[in-house]
Image: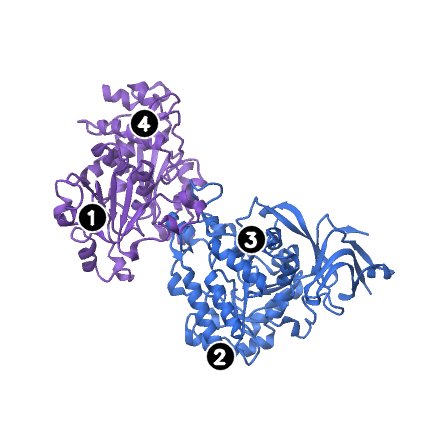
Amino acid sequence: MTAELTRIATGAPGTSSTSGTGWNHQDILDLDDFSVAEIEIVLALADRMREVLDRRIARVPALRGYTIVNLFFEPSTRTRASFELAGKVLGADVLSVTASTSSVTKGESLIDTVRTLRAMRTDAIIMRHSMSGAPYLAAEHTDASIINAGDGAHAHPTQALLDLYTMRSRVGDLRGKRVVMVGDISHSRVARSDMWGLAAMGADVVVCGPPTLLPRGLRASDRPAHAESAMPPVTIETDIDRALDGADVVMALRLQSERQDSGLLPSLHEYSQLYQVTQERLARAKPNHLLMHPGPKNEGIEIAGTVAAGRNSIIEEQVTNGVAVRMALLYLLSGRTESPGGAPGGMPGGEIRS
Amino acid sequence: MTTLAIHNGRVIDPALGRDGIADVVIVDGRIARVGPNEGDMVVEAERIDATGLIVTPGFIDLHTHLREPGFEHKETIATGTLAAARGGYTTVCAMPNTQPPLDSRAAVESVLREAENSAVVRVLPIGTITRGRAGKELAPAGELASAGVVALSDDGDAVADPSLMRHALEYSTRFGLPVAQHCEDPALVRDGQMHEGWVATRLGLRGRPASAEETFVARDIALAELAGAHLHICHVSTAGSVALIAAARARGARVTAEVTPHHLTLTHEEVAFTADYRTAHYQTNAKVNPPLREEADLAALAIALRDGVIDCIATDHAPHSVGDKEIEFDIASPGLTMLETSFGLCMRLVHDGRLSLPALVERLTIGPARAWGLDARPGLEGIGTLAPGALGDVALLDPNAEWTVDPSTFASKGKNTPLGGRQLRGRVVATIFGGRLVHETDRVVAL
C-alpha cells in the first residue's frame, strides 16, 4: 500500500495509474496545464486523504515541518478554512495572512511580499487575489510553491479538482457525461477552471447564462483555426430548459448583486425567473442527476432552497471533498515520498493502516 | 563649411520619386546634391560608404512619449531622442501627457528648452486639447500654437464629451492645428485590460472591445466634418476603424491616420502565449491601449497602410520602468517601447511582400510630414525629403540584417517590449541629423 501510494504520489514510471507520465507541478495555477494523468494522480491520492479525514482523529504527521501560508488578498471563509484544515490534518504549520489589496496600491509589491514569505522559509503560498494572473506573477518570482486559490475571473483550480473528484466518486467515468453550468459565466473563475478539467476528463460541458454574462470567444468559431484547442470545447445555451435537458450534473454558479448595478441584468428578480435552478426545471435533467454549487449560495436567486437541500444535492460533499483534495495537492507539492530524515510516520499511507 | 558625403547607396526618396544608386552630399547641415557620383565631385568631405545600404530621409514619428517633465524615471528627452536616433528617427513629436501636461506656453517652452540642451534629434511638442488633460475645458490653443506646438492631443485618454470635442475641433481651425484623438470610449472600455476576445476570456481579463474604438472614430469623423476641422486618428487598431476612415476620406473629410508597428504585426495572443496554447501567461509588456487585436485587423491595417488610407506609421513609443510593468496585469501601465524596434518590425510587411520598401519609407518620412503639414512650417522646409536645401536628416538602412532584440541594450530607459529575444530582419545602420552622425553601428564604413 505504501509503495503504491508513493508511486501514485510521485508518478514514478511503470505504474499503471500514471502510464509513465508523472506529477510535474511546482505550482498549481490553473488546470490548463494539467495532463489527464496528473489529474488522475490527484484524484487517486485524494481518495486516500478522504480516508484520513474521515478517521476519528484526523491527524497525520506527513507534512511535519512543512510551512504553508494562506495569503488572501480577498475575503474568503470556505476556501481559506479548507486549506487551513488540509494543512493541519497533515501536520503542516499553517499561517493565515489577510493582505489588503490597498497595500498594493500603496506601493507594497506582490513580488516583495512573496519573496519575504519565502525568506522566512515558507514552503507553499496559497494565494487568493482579486486580479487575474496575480499568482502567475508570484510564481515567477519565488521558488516556493504557489497554489492559486482563486484569481480574479480567471481560475480556481483546486475548486475544479474537488468538483471533478466529487463527480467521479458519484458517477465514475465522466466521458460523455453532460455537465451543465448555469449562471454568471463571464465573471466565474470556477467555471473557467471546471471547463479545463471537465474537458480533459471527456465530459460534455454546457454553459448557460444570459447573453450579458457569457464571455466572448467561447465558441470555437470565435477563434482562428490555429487556436482551436486554445480553449476547452463547450456548448453555449441561453435557455436554461434546453441546457438542462438530459443533464447528468447541474452546477449553479453564484450571482453577485453588483451585476444588476453595472447594467448587466435588469433585476435579480428577472434573473431568478429566467435562470434559477428549480425543482421544476430539473425535471428535464436525468432523474439521478447531481446538483452542485461552489458556494457561497444565494438561495432564491440562482438556486431554489428546496433544490439546494434536495436529494440530488451533493453540495456539502463538495465541501468535505475540498479538504481531501487540498490535502492531496499539498502533499504532492511537498515532494515528500517517504519519512523525512527517517522520522516515523511520514507517509499518510502508513498512517492509514496504523 | 562641413561636408558629409554618403556614397553609393540605394537612395529612396518617395517625395521626389527617386529610387536608385546615388550619392548624397550634405553641406552645413542641409542637403546639397543627390545623384550618381555627386560625392566624388566634392573635394573635402567626411565620407561614408553606403554600398549595399538603403539611404532615406530621416524618419518622422508623430507619436512619441518622452515622459519629461514629470516621469524622468521612465524616459527623458535625452534618452528618448537617443532611442529615436537608434531607430532612424530624426524628428519626434512629443505627446503632452507629462507632469505638468503641455497645456500652457510655459510648459511647452520648458520642453523646447530642455530639447535644445539635451535632445539628440528634433523634438516637436504637441499641446493638450483640454486643460490638464481633464476633458472638462479647452486648453489655450492659441497660446500653445504660438509657443510652437504642431498638433493638439489628450492622448492616453480620449476627449469623451462630444460637445467639448466638437468645440475643440472648431477652435483648432483658427490655428491650422490637427486634433489628434486617442479613440476609445472610456465608458465602453471601463477598466478593460486587453482586446475583448477569446484570449481575454481565457485569461479572465476584462476586455476593451473593438467597438469602443470604432464608435469614437465614427463620432469624431462626424464632428470633424461638422467643424470643417482636421482630425487625426491616433494608433488605428481595428478593421472597422479602417473602413470608417476610408469612407470619410472618400467624402473628402480632412481625416488623417496613423498606425503603430505593433498594431500592424502583433495580435492579442502576445499577451498570453509564447510557444504553445497549452499554458498561458500574463505578458504585461504586451499591454497597450488601444490593445493588440486580431489577425483580421492586422490584415486590414496593412492594406490600409499600403493604399494610403492610413497616412503613416507612428510608434506610440511609451517607455515605462520595470516597476510599472512587473506587477499585477490589472495595474500594470499600458504601452510599449518601440522607437528602436520600429523599422525591423515594420520590415516584416516588406519581407512578407505586403508592402514595398519605397512605400514603407514613404509612410515613415514624407507620409507623416504631409499628414500634419510639417513641411509647410517655417524652418522645416523639405522635411521628410532629400531635396536640395532640405534638412540634412538621413537614415541608412540594411533591410536584410538580422538581429536579436535585447532590451538591455536599448538607449531608451523603457525596456518594456514583448519582442525581447525575438529575431528581426531589417536594421538601422546609421542616422544623420542636420548633417551630423547621431547613431552609427559597426556596419558604417568611413572612406
Kindly identify the amino acid type of the residue bearing the numbered disc 1: Lys
Residue A129 relative to residue A53: left or right: right
Q: Which residue is mark 4?
A: A64
In this view, the residue in front, B259 or B318, is: B259
Mark 3 or 4, which is nearer the eye? 3
Say what secondary structure mark 1 lies in.
loop
Mark 1 or 4, which is nearer the eye? 1
Say what secondary structure mark 3 lies in.
loop
Residue B292 visible at all: no
Q: Position of residue B333 (x, y in %)?
A: 47, 55
To the question of a shared chain for discs 3 and 4, the answer is: no
Residue A68 relative to residue A267: left or right: right
Q: What is the C-alpha distance between the residues marked 3 and 2?
A: 38 Å
Circle 3 chain: B
Q: Which chain is blue?
A: B
Kindly identify the amino acid type of the residue bearing the numbered disc 3: Gly
Mark 3 or 1, which is nearer the eye? 1
Q: What is the C-alpha distance between the residues marked 2 and 1?
A: 55 Å
- Whichever of labels 1 and 4 marks the residue nearer the N terminus, that label is 4
Are dots 1 and 4 in contact, CB under 8 Å? no
Residue A65 relative to residue B252: left or right: left
To the question of a shared chain for discs 3 and 1, the answer is: no
Q: Which chain is purple?
A: A
B422 shown above or below B298: above
Kindly identify the amino acid type of the residue bearing the numbered disc 2: Ala
Q: Badge 3: few (under 14), some or many (20 or more) residues near its Cα, within 10 Å? A: many
Q: Which residue is mark 1?
A: A297
Q: Quadrant of residue B92?
A: bottom right
- Say which mark, if any, is on residue B227: 2
Q: Which residue is mark 3?
A: B414
